[in-house]
Image (tube, rainbow, N blue to C red):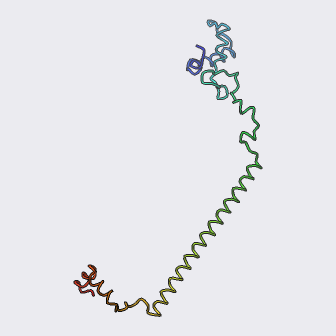
Amino acid sequence: EPGEASRSSPAARGSRKRAREIEENGLEEEEEVDEHEMMRLRKAQRPTYKQVVGKASGRAWKLPAERASMVMKPATSRGIKTWDQRMKEKAEKKAFQAQMKEAADAARAKRKEEHERRAKKKQQKEENRQRTGEGLYKPEITNARTIAKRAKSKEFKKQKALKMV
């Protein structure tokens, strides 16, 4: 049986051993092996990784196929870079990342500074309010219209009922 199926069968493996024995020792008295059988035994090798080219071909003399685009284009246009090019790109990438980190740190520092400035301003405002006493007491309403308007409001009536006013 020619083909890949017969090569990987145990019978084929045995036949290679048998071919080697025949080549080394010669034929025994009762055995006769014709030339065609000898060639079949000699050729029946399992294909190696490099020999297997196509799915069905299995022809050892065929070279692994290359795409025409790979053959025609130079290495540089296919994206294959030299060591110097890779090192240059690596340095550029590192510089860019450092620049981005520096920008992020500057923005973070600016936000922190603004936060501290606002907190300080708020604290100063609170201190000033405590010092002057502004906003600690409610001024007494003397305007008659305002008093009448408040008396009519539902909210004021609720507060009056609860004796909050």
- Image location of residue 94, percent across then percent down: 69, 58
User: Which residue, as the protein is rendered here, is positioned at the far bottom?
Assistant: 132
Using residue 124 as the reference point, say whether residue 85 is left or right of it: right
Q: 74 or 136: nearer the eye?
A: 136
Q: Residue at x 52, y 80 (%)?
A: 119
- Image location of residue 10, percent across then percent down: 55, 20
Using residue 53 as the reference point, say whether residue 155 is left or right of it: left
- Image location of residue 29, percent across then percent down: 64, 7
Q: 20 or 126: nearer the eye?
A: 126
Q: Residue at x 64, y 10 (%)?
A: 37
Quadrant in the picture for residue 60? top right
In the rendered view, would you say 70 is above or below 12? below
Q: Residue at x 59, y 76 (%)?
A: 113
The quadrant of the rendering that contains the N terminus is: top right
Q: Residue at x 59, y 20 (%)?
A: 4
Quadrant in the picture for residue 130? bottom left
User: Which residue, as the protein is rendered here, is positioned at the far front?
Assistant: 145
- Image location of residue 23, percent across then percent down: 69, 15
Using residue 149 as the reference point, say whether residue 61 is left or right of it: right
In the rendered view, would you say 22 is above or below 136? above
The quadrant of the rendering that contains the C terminus is: bottom left
In the rendered view, would you say 37 is above or below 98? above
Q: For the image shown, how many numbered marks are present on the structure?
A: 0
